[in-house]
Image: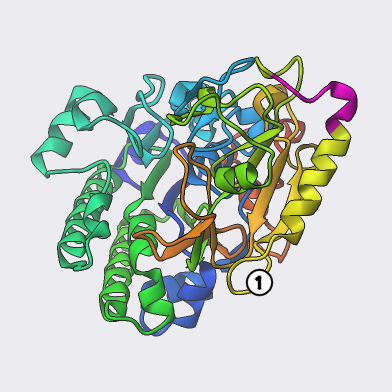
Amino acid sequence: MGLFDRLRGDDDPRVAFFGIDGVPYSFLKDNASEFPNIASLAKEGSAGAIDSIVPPESSACWPALTTGVNPGETGVYGFQDREVGSYDTYVPMGRDVQATRIWDRVADSGRNATVMNVPVTFPPQRNVQRMVSGFLSPGVDKAAYPDELRNYLNSIDYRIDANAKLGHKEDKSEFMENAHETLKARYEAFRHYIEQDDWDLFFGVFMTTDRVNHFLFKHYEEDGEYKQEFIDFYKKVDEYLGKLRDALADDVTMVVASDHGFTSLDHEVHFNQWLENEGWLSYEDDDHEELGDIADDTVAYSLIPGRFYINLEGREPRGSVPEDEYEEKRAELKEKLEALEGPNGKKVCAQVVEKEDAFQGDHEDIAPDLVAIPNYGFDLKAGFKGHDDVFGVGPRNGMHSFDNASLFVDDADVTVPEDVDLLDIAPTILDLMNVEYSASELDGRSLA
């Protein structure tokens, strides 16, 4: 029990959550000898592969993980969402998350939360003891609250994110140096506040794992030039997680999880180009760059990753599909997507999900009508600038996967069965902390 607990006389159990964005469970399990601290966590506690959500994109995943509800409740479906009744789009931020975060529940119960580097949390909330926002934040000065946190983070050269642009270079050495520096500063900040020991919930995310996976995962899977650098990076992740575990007091349960899995990328699939080729999408003129440039005879359009919208009359400003034709058009599009093959003859989509099967809640008005879950190797894109070909290759060689996300809980009484998904993490943490909630409010179930 920590010093602050003794002073408070607080016997409630605590949780320290560490996110490892985009790390596949099979990778950690298959290389257990390289990562002894993660292996020890699995052996002494509970661990397993879990499913992500639809769609498995970080901007949608982290709001779902931190609330325990699906995007129909959070109101966040991806990196880019569209305005209701408009072709205007926006990048969802913290205030766009319409569901209750687990740290809000902790704060409402009169306890303290430290929240660090969680994606889609900008601007930082004031109802927790401290927060530095994560992915998509403009910088530490605006992303950290209170001043004490801001000053400390600046003193250690803390960075919101690694410089992904460096990963576009053929020579990955500068990118990897930047990734290690970002990772180290993140660990130092986590360790500093773990040891300060004035929190009931610590919730921090290592985002750099996702960045490294995007540019080096294929090197790992295919024995490429940077395979050893990839393994060495994860050895450092393992070392840091081991040190953080050692720093935790006895009344703290450690939870480690990723928001989605990862696999090698073979082909980028430019779906709006495919829709245009198939006669489903057209533009008002040749100089098109965004969703608002589509013409009024468009039948369907796409947003990343793999989200498809019927251009429905009465819902879209220039909707061309009458409501009584909606089901027919959606079924036709779904069938075409399910039949689509890549240059290698493999099916592009593992599954095409209708919105009723993926999203429930008060924020279904901007939900995609269909979501394509790709087979391994096909990364689903959806820009509006146009491409010469439907299938292409970009600077990334790794992509998100719906399955094979990771969950580790340092508690042997917690079980991780095969049917676990991302939505089960929030109620598990709340139960581990003895924070009351109504099970009917959450889509997930507790594993505790």
What residue is at 70 percent from the left and 65 percent from the top? 417
- Residue 68 left/right relative to 24: right
What residue is at 58 percent from the left and 65 percent from the top? 404
Vertical arrangement, residue 280 with respect to residue 239, above or below:
above
Vertical arrangement, residue 17 with respect to residue 123, above or below:
below
- Residue 133 left/right relative to 280: left
In the figure, residue 436 lies in which quadrant?
top right
Out of 279 and 87, give the one closest to the viewer.
279
SS type, badge 1? loop
Residue 363, horizontal then vertical, whole percent? 67, 23
Q: Give the range drawn in magenta.
A: 319-326
Residue 92, horizontal then vertical, whole percent? 47, 28
What residue is at 36 percent from the left and 82 percent from the top? 34
The disc labelled 1 sits on which kind of residue? Lys
Out of 115 and 71, give the one closest to the viewer.
71
**Residue 323 among those drawn in magenta:** yes
Residue 352, horizontal then vertical, whole percent? 74, 51
Residue 334, horizontal then vertical, whole percent? 78, 48
- Residue 282 left/right relative to 44: right
Residue under circle 1? 346
Q: How crowded is mark 1: few (under 14 residues within 10 Å), some or many (20 or more)?
A: some
Out of 36 and 379, give the one closest to the viewer.
379
**Residue 160 among those drawn in magenta:** no
From this viewpoint, is residue 429 visible?
no
From this viewpoint, is residue 118 visible?
yes
Image mark count: 1
- Residue 399 left/right relative to 229: right
